[in-house]
Image (cartoon, rainbow, N blue to C red):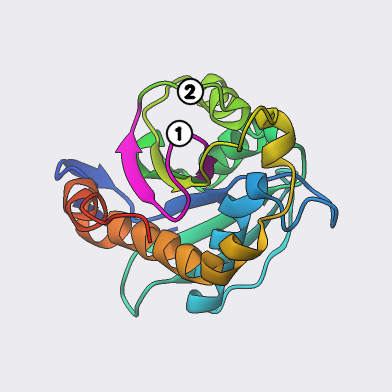
Amino acid sequence: MFWRRRKNCEGSDAVGDAWLIVGLGNPGPQYETTRHNVGQMALDTLAERIGGRFAAHRTNSRVAEGFLRPGGPKLVLAKSNGYMNTSGGPVSALAKYFSVPAERVVVLHDELDLPFDTIKLKQGGGHGGHNGLRDIAKALGTPEFLRVRIGIGRPPGQQDPADFVLRPFGKVERDTLDVLLEDAADAAEAVVSEGLTAAQQRFHGRAAR
């Protein structure tokens, strides 16, 4: 494979131009529309934009490949075939297979600590109790991958957060869910095309609708 030199998301030299964008979730139709799978929902939106179709890959995942624009960086979109808390193995294997360093791995995931319909971006940091992020950091050997944090809000009343994330979005949420998924896909594109800082400036000033 031919690699060319380019700038990474913070402006330093990097070799190659592939980005690995991962949507977190659980496998099976019973989980497809749950809050915990919003990362995979957003990844589906991005796949539609680049004309990518997911196919089985040797890394125990489904992969779609494409480009944001002609001559632009290659995007490898991926969903693990396993459960959320075992996301690390497939992500690490994909990063090695496609020669993508951690700083060009972008993870789309649900975020309890953000209000619904809010997008935040960050690189590195803790996992905040999110088992998918925890496992990815362990498998990559670093937490310094990029995150598109998709706000789902806290459960009402005394509802257990573990139950809340495994339930489908409510009717009011579904009315704006498509827009949230478009925003999350926009954020992932912005990280790749504009860099983390510029993308943060675009999305962090937005109030939840």
Q: Residue 168: tell me if it is visible.
A: yes
Q: Residue 85: tell me if it is visible.
A: no
In the rendered structure, are the residues bearing label 2 and label 1 in contact, judged by CB atoms less than 8 Å apart?
Answer: yes
In this view, 155 is above or below 43 = above
Which residue type carries mark 1? Answer: Asp
Residue at position x 22%, y 52% from top? Answer: 195
Q: Which residue is mark 1?
A: 113
Residue at position x 57%, y 27% from top? Answer: 130
Which residue type carries mark 2? Answer: Gly
Residue at position x 77%, y 39% from top? Answer: 82
Magenta highlight range: 109-124
Residue at position x 61%, y 31% from top? Answer: 132
Q: Secondary structure at mark 1?
A: loop
Q: Secondary structure at mark 2?
A: loop
Packing grade of label 2 (10 A; few <14, some 14-19, many >=20) is few
Packing grade of label 1 (10 A; few <14, some 14-19, many >=20) is few
Pinpoint residue 23: horizontal percent, then vertical percent. Answer: 57, 50
Q: Quadrant of the C terminus?
A: bottom left
Mark 2 or mark 1, which is nearer to you? 1
Query: Residue 158's quadrant in the figure?
Result: top right
- In the image, taking residue 56 as reference, residue 30 lies left or right, namely right
Asked whether 65 or 136 is in front, the reply is: 136
Pinpoint residue 129: horizontal percent, then vertical percent. Answer: 55, 21
Find the distance from the CA under tag 2 to the CA under tag 1.
Answer: 9 Å
Q: Which residue is mark 2?
A: 128
